[in-house]
Image (tube, rainbow, N blue to C red):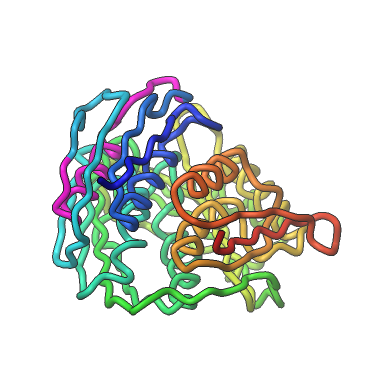
Amino acid sequence: MTKMIEIDGSNGEGGGQILRTSLAAAMATGQPLRICNIRAGRAKPGLLRQHLTCAKAAAAITGGDLEGAVLGAGELVFHPGKIQPGAYEFTIGTAGSCHLVLQTILPVLLTATGASKLVLEGGTHNPSSPPYEFIERAYLPVLRSMGARITSRIERYGFMPAGGGRIVVDIEPVNRLEQIDVIERGAVSEIYAEGFFANLPFDIVERELATLGDRLKLDDDQRRVREVKSQGPGNALMLTVIADGATEVVAEFGRRGVSAANIANGVASLAERYLKSSAAVGPHLADQLLLPMALAGGGSFSTLRPTRHSLTNMETIQAILPVRIAQARAPNGKDHVISVETA
């Protein structure tokens, strides 16, 4: 009998990443999974709709079985079957992140036996996860450099709290992912800011872009207004940094009671921290590259000081997959290098 993976969801930062990584690793290995204390570190623990959707998606893609897959559940048992490529549509039903569902199931579909098409509906721009632009500009290009063949598009924007967004992802599988090293950021070729808004006054993004642009000394053509269609009102401010070795996207989301200046200064602070370093990979991308590199059997990247979220993800991966993940100071003494290798 195949040994069951036992994971305590209260470990480390105790969030949903433990569940998502565990589901993905169980799919990849074919091992059954029991996870308890799900999201114990959150104010509202247990399965929310986006986490429940992740579990149901994992079961659908493998023809697997779930026990305890109900809203609010603190324990879940997953018996995966064989990975089955195909056309899948998953609807979260709230503004929960489409991209976190994607990151649960995408890694195993990259090396499936056939092509897949994913249609995900829910949140595309909310404060609990990176926005669609981060996925398209930062995350997917690194996967493509590992050999993955992926295209994506956003068909509807979904802001918190209305949701209703829709993304489509097409995957042509490869035999295996290649090991890569993303160490050098290289020269920065372009920096630009974008203010996204839907069903809100234009002057909100105008003020955000003015504050961010002045602080980072951006020219007018580096300040871009994006009016989009969405079921509900929403606002996001982003800065994209394109370099030879990687792309970084930092974002903040407008919310009631927070001024446009505070949103802009939040983006500026995140961007300045990244730009003052020599790291190729930002904190969010660092967290999300760990699993694909583990499934590839190795790889490395330079980043800022790992977050508690990333450290927890490292622990979870090493508890399931036969890899070692090490971190060390970069030669400049400031940045960090994360290395993944087969155990």
Quarter of the image for residue 160 reads top left
Magenta extent: 42-65
Which image quarter holds the N terminus? top left
Number of callouts: 0
Q: Is residue 47 magenta?
A: yes
Viewer-nearest residue: 188 or 43: 43
Looking at the image, which is closer to me, 93 or 29?
Answer: 29
Which image quadrant: the C terminus?
Answer: bottom right
Residue 54, x across and y down, in percent: 27, 45
Q: Is residue 187 located in the magenta-colored stretch of the structure? A: no
- Asked if one can make out residue 76 in the rendered structure from this viewpoint, the answer is yes
> Would you say residue 215 is visible in this rendering?
no
Q: Residue at x 32, y 40 (%)?
A: 4
The residue located at (34%, 79%) in the rendering is 175
In depth, the one of 50 and 196 nearer the eye is 50
Q: Between residues 20 and 94, which one lies in front from this camera angle?
A: 20
Residue furthest to the top in view is 43
Rendered residue at 33%/25% (across/down): 46
Would residue 143 be found to the left or right of residue 63 on screen?
right
Task: Tell me which corner region of the image, top left, top right, bottom left or bottom right, holds residue 169.
Answer: bottom left
Which residue is outermost to the front? Answer: 1
Q: Is residue 253 above or below residue 324?
A: above
Q: Measuring 54% from the left and 51% from the top, which residue is drawn there?
A: 287
The spot of residue 296 in percent (x, y) is 47, 68
Residue 217 rendering spot, x and y as whole percentages:
72, 61
Q: Position of residue 56 (x, y in %)?
A: 20, 44
